[in-house]
Image (cartoon, grey):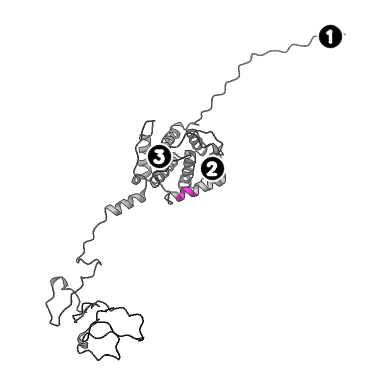
């Protein structure tokens, strides 16, 4: 029995394994991520790396780029988040940020919820933040950011459009210093407050009385009728509550009832006796000018 040698395997030319392209750390969001990083670092002087307590080593521009890549939201949401951070800085000028990651993800999450009808849950934002924060921390960060901003969370036109143009122009490249924007540039509430304090129109009325529509207090008049001045020609004949024919200097009000004393029903003496305040033993006689008087009161003496 003959034994045949084993057949040799046919060899084929092999190609070298394709080299895996190096992953882009910015995920195609380099321009916007770097721009946002410059803006946040300018406002709060944040370090590039998060605190060691987060157990993460994601650099701030890479962290922002991943959030933009993972959410795939419109760039206007990113600029709205920067508007919120500008308002936060305006409310707390001396604030410094120990974590730009925390500041950005909080503002970015809130702006997406304000601007988008269908947005991510807070549990999804934990994934967007690459597990740097727990769900409890995400919830707390959201509440605190809203409270610090006094719930001024909207960023619409023309503020958003003007802000985006300014930031794209001023922060497009690294430099030693960047401009600071006024609060009125990013806040309609601040604009209204400024207008109300500086441009309050002065209402011109026909009288110098502090209460519009009421004439000046009239002086005590004598029994002799006098010709009315020009400003009171249209005044009705009905006397005002402060009208009096007497010469009492306190014809516009009555003195307060005294406290204490044996008498429980004190009365004001008539103007024909001493003007001091006292207790009457009985009801006073009718005043001779009662029919010509509207009201009268004597000054009180304590």
Where disc 3 sits, the SS reads: helix
Could you tell me residue 265's position as x and y percent? 34, 86
Q: Which residue is mark 3?
A: 43
**Residue 21, image quadrant:** top right
Report the Cα–Cα distance between label 2 and label 3. Answer: 24 Å
Magenta region includes residue 296: no
**Residue 134, image quadrant:** top right
Q: Which of disc 3 and disc 2 is earlier in sequence? A: 3
Could you tell me residue 271's position as x and y percent? 22, 84
Give the magenta part as a residue range.
143-147
Crowding at dot 3, Cα within 10 Å, few <14 / some 14-19 / many 20+, comes out as many
Q: Which of disc 3 and disc 1 is earlier in sequence? A: 1
Q: Which of disc 1 and disc 2 is earlier in sequence? A: 1
Name which residue lies at 29% across and 54% down. Answer: 197
Q: Which residue is mark 2?
A: 125
Where disc 2 sits, the SS reads: helix
Vertically, is 297 above or below 38?
below
Could you tell me residue 7's position as x and y percent? 76, 11
Q: Tell me the mark number nearer the camera, choosing from 1 and 3.
A: 3
Left or right of 177: which side holds 288? left
Left or right of 2: which side holds 268? left
Q: Which residue is mark 1?
A: 3
């Amino acid at each position: 029995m003959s034994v045949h040698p084993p057949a040799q395997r046919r060899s084929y030319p092999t190609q070298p394994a394709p080299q895996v392209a190096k992953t882009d750390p910015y995920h195609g969001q380099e321009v916007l991520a770097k721009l946002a990083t410059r803006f946040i670092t300018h406002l709060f002087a944040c370090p590039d790396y998060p605190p060691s307590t987060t157990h993460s080593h994601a650099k701030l521009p890479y962290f922002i780029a991943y959030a933009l890549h993972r959410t795939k939201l419109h760039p206007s949401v990113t600029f709205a988040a920067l508007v919120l951070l500008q308002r936060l800085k305006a409310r707390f000028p001396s604030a410094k940020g120990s974590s730009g990651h925390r500041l950005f993800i909080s503002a970015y999450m809130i702006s997406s919820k304000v601007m988008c009808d269908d947005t991510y849950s807070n549990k999804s934002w934990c994934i967007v933040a690459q597990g740097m924060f727990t769900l409890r921390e995400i919830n707390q960060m959201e509440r605190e950011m809203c409270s610090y901003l006094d719930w001024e969370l909207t960023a619409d036109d023309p503020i958003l459009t003007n802000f985006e143009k300014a930031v794209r122009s001023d922060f497009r490249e690294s430099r030693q210093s960047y401009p600071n924007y006024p609060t009125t540039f990013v806040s309609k509430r601040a604009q209204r407050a400024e207008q109300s304090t500086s441009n309050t129109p002065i209402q011109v009325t026909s009288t110098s009385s502090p209460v519009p529509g009421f004439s000046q207090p009239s002086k005590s008049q004598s029994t002799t009728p006098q010709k009315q001045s020009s400003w009171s020609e249209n005044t009705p004949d009905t006397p005002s509550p402060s009208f009096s024919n007497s010469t009492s200097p306190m014809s516009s009000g009555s003195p307060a009832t005294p406290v204490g004393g044996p008498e429980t029903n004190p009365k004001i003496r008539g103007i024909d006796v001493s003007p001091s305040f006292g207790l009457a033993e009985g009801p006073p006689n009718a005043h001779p000018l009662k029919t010509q008087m509207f009201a009268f009161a004597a000054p009180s003496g304590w």
